[in-house]
């Protein structure tokens, strides 16, 4: 069977199940099986596949057809300049979170600090912490999570990317956050926390609702429980002038609610920023001197 034939059959199968981006999903599966870049797939359409590869492709197609994220099926995903191991222990990294990392990397006051201390709250796969460590080598980076399974995955990614000596990972329930950097006050906190209201979690697409970890999605009644907790902690953990970077929901005026709470806690220079699609997705702010 030729690659082009099985790609078309896979695309048709996904379309009948009303899956998003059917052709893209088929090409992602094929690229993983052939160990090539997806951009190379159009050049290989006449390639004859072995029975083994055809059967492997069909197994992957069946899993995606049942709603499983293609990232879990192939077991990896690219995030900025890193290729990460991805499975059901973590959320699938989103493009918006890559933009969140860029906001930190572009923060001039933070870049002016020698060896700044940066904490990734809710590290999951480690995508944020590992990207910051990779692209901001002068920084000292830690990641925390409440889930030991997620931390295990983050450690696997750190090891495979040779970044385990640049990022430290902790269970935030089991350690005193003030001691993560031997008592040093933080210069930045970055987080893509659970921010979906509990009642909305059951209305998520089946691909998200049925496969991605609920604890990494559910942000409580209004979606802001974890964000408020992080902000309450940040007042004690950040140095004066320290900065926070949050990804939030683009719905329900979350950005405005987070901004208001930050102001109540003594943050200033608060900014609500849009993602590449024009949605209000990020909130940043600096802890005012003397708080």
Image (spheres, rainbow, N blue to C red):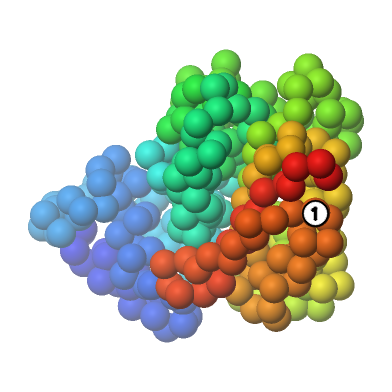
Return the x and y of residue 260 as percentages of the image width and height: 76, 68
- Whether 227 is drawn above or below 140: the answer is below
- Secondary structure of the residue carrying numbered label 1: loop
Q: Is residue 142 above or below residue 207?
A: above
- Decide which of 58, 193 is in the foreground and name it: 193
The residue where tag 1 is placed is 266
In this view of the protein, which residue sits in the foreground, 64 or 160?
160
Quadrant in which the C terminus appears: top right
Q: Is residue 75 left or right of residue 226?
A: left
Q: Nearer the viewer, residue 210 or 171?
A: 171
Q: Residue at x 33, y 78 (%)?
A: 12
Q: Is residue 170 left or right of residue 72?
A: right
Question: Residue at coordinates 80% horizontally, 64% vertically from top-left?
Answer: 261
In this view, 181 is above or below 247? above
* Image quarter of residue 208: bottom right
Quarter of the image containing the N terminus? Answer: bottom left
- Label 1 environment density (alpha carbons within 10 Å; few <14, some 14–19, many ≥20): some
Instruction: Choose top left, top right, bottom left or bottom right for residue 148.
Output: top right
Q: Position of residue 45 (x, y in %)?
A: 14, 59
């Amino acid at each position: 069977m030729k690659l082009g034939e099985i790609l078309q059959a896979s695309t048709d199968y996904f379309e009948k199940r009303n899956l998003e981006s059917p052709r893209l999903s088929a090409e992602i599966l094929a690229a993983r099986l052939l160990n090539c870049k997806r951009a190379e797939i159009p050049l290989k359409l006449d390639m004859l596949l072995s029975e083994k590869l055809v059967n492997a492709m069909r197994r992957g197609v069946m899993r995606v057809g049942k709603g499983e994220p293609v990232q879990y099926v192939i077991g990896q995903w690219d995030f900025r300049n890193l290729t990460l191991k991805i499975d059901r222990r973590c959320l699938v990294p989103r493009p918006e979170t890559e933009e969140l990392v860029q906001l930190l990397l572009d923060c001039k006051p933070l870049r002016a600090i020698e060896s700044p201390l940066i904490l990734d709250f809710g590290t999951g796969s480690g995508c944020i912490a590992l990207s910051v460590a990779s692209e901001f080598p002068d920084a000292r980076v830690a990641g925390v999570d409440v889930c030991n399974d997620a931390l295990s995955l983050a450690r696997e990614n750190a090891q495979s990317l040779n970044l385990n000596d640049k990022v430290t990972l902790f269970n935030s329930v089991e350690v005193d956050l003030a001691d993560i950097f031997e008592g040093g006050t933080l210069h930045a906190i970055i987080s893509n926390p659970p921010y979906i209201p509990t009642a909305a979690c059951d209305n998520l697409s089946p691909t998200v609702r049925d496969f991605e970890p609920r604890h990494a999605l559910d942000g409580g009644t209004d979606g802001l429980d974890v964000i408020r907790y992080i902000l309450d902690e940040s007042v004690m953990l950040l140095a004066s002038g320290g900065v926070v970077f949050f990804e939030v929901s683009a719905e329900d005026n979350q950005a405005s609610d987070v901004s208001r709470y930050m102001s109540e806690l003594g943050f200033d220079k608060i900014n609500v920023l849009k993602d590449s699609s024009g949605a209000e997705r990020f909130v940043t702010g600096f802890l005012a001197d003397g708080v």
